[in-house]
Image (spheres, grey):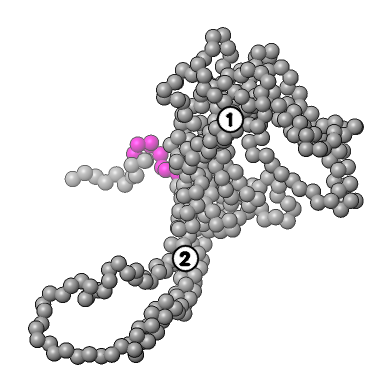
Amino acid sequence: MRKALLKTPYELWKGKTPNLSYFRVLGCRCFILNDKDQLRKFDSRSDEGIFLGYSGNSSAFRVFNLRSKMIMESVNVVFDDRSIAAIEDSLILHEAELKNSAEEEVDITLENAEDKEEEMSDKAVEVRHPVTQVHRNHSSSDLIGDITEGRKTRGIKLNFKQMVSMAIIQFECFVSVIEPRNHLEALKDADWIISMEEELEEFVRNDVWELVPLPDGVNVVGIKWIFKNKTDDAGSIVRNKSRLVAQGYSQVEGVDFDETFAPVARLESIRLFLGMACILNFKVYQMDVKSAFLNDILQEEVYVAQPKGFEDPTYPDYVYKLKKALYGLKQAPRAWYEHLTKFLIDTGYVRGTVDKT
């Protein structure tokens, strides 16, 4: 017989009592800090949510935001461990409402089928034949009808807890909530792989580069992946965006680039334009050019390395020769400015005499 130590394995291994303050009641009510970029004076400083667990990649908590109906990970969470009973009561209330609504449903399809069956039975003529032999074995069509004909089944009713779980599953099927730190982490997530493939498809669509052998004595500019979750006004993640950018710090002036200055519109010009639009009752539209820099023709000869994780297996030593600008290049803003200016002038617009931007 061994004497009971009355200690946890953690205490035996570490020599100290474990700290349980990090643990929270699963399913309790919590409040997530509302960290939107532009929070107005009367906007709520927090969102109410339900505690789901802990993040597998950081020290953050995983919570379900009741306002945005999305799952979130945050370290700025305040918990109300005593509210679990109130949440259970609300779940029971929702289940009762769903049950009452299910009892009031009317199966229209079934009623139509019964009406048609009654009409057919009225028109049918009953013919009786004497039974001379009893068959023990019957065909499947006699018992269950035509097996190729579709049958109506009753839909599955989900309670409120299952509906919350389904909402979380559907959300995680579309986007990933984790921002990878490098391409190795991104290649382990199917959602980020799709995002990276979309970025490369944009390169092919715009004819940005071509794979060529590495020329002698040229400077090869490195490229890297940037990963960012796009959010809406409520702070909910709506898209996983991957951007392939050039490491402009490795460019050599006079070799990879010359002119880099790109003028921007003055704030006074924008105010004057909006004021004239109001006076003349013009309608002003705002637009965004998707992957704008990928439309600019490069004047210099620039070579970049193959993107990590998507190297050509046939020609791993080849490099890409850029036909158009790439995000991160020092001359990319100027190339876009020249391209946009030429398009506007060819369309019929006239450059201003005071502010020529």
Start-end of magenta stretch: 12-19
Q: Position of residue 42 (x, y in %)?
A: 73, 56
Indicate which disc residue 160 carries: 2
Instruction: Tell me the residue at 33%/44% (across/down).
Output: 7
Q: Amino acid at mark 2?
A: Phe
Specify whether 46 is left or right of 84: right
Q: Position of residue 21 (x, y in %)?
A: 48, 48
Q: Does the magenta-highlighted stretch encompass residue 133?
A: no
Q: Amino acid at mark 1?
A: Asp
Q: 300 or 328: which is nearer to us?
A: 300
Mark 2 surroundings within 10 Å by alpha-carbon count, few (fewer than 14), some (14 through 19), many (20 or more): some
Which callout, 1 or 2, points at the residue further toward the start of the chain?
Answer: 2
Residue designated by label 1: 207
Disc 1 and disc 2: Cα gap in Å?
A: 50 Å
In this view of the protein, can residue 192 be seen by the observer? no
Instruction: Tell me the residue at 58%/12% (across/down).
Output: 218
Q: Position of residue 249 (x, y in %)?
A: 63, 20
Specify whether 264 is left or right of 303: right
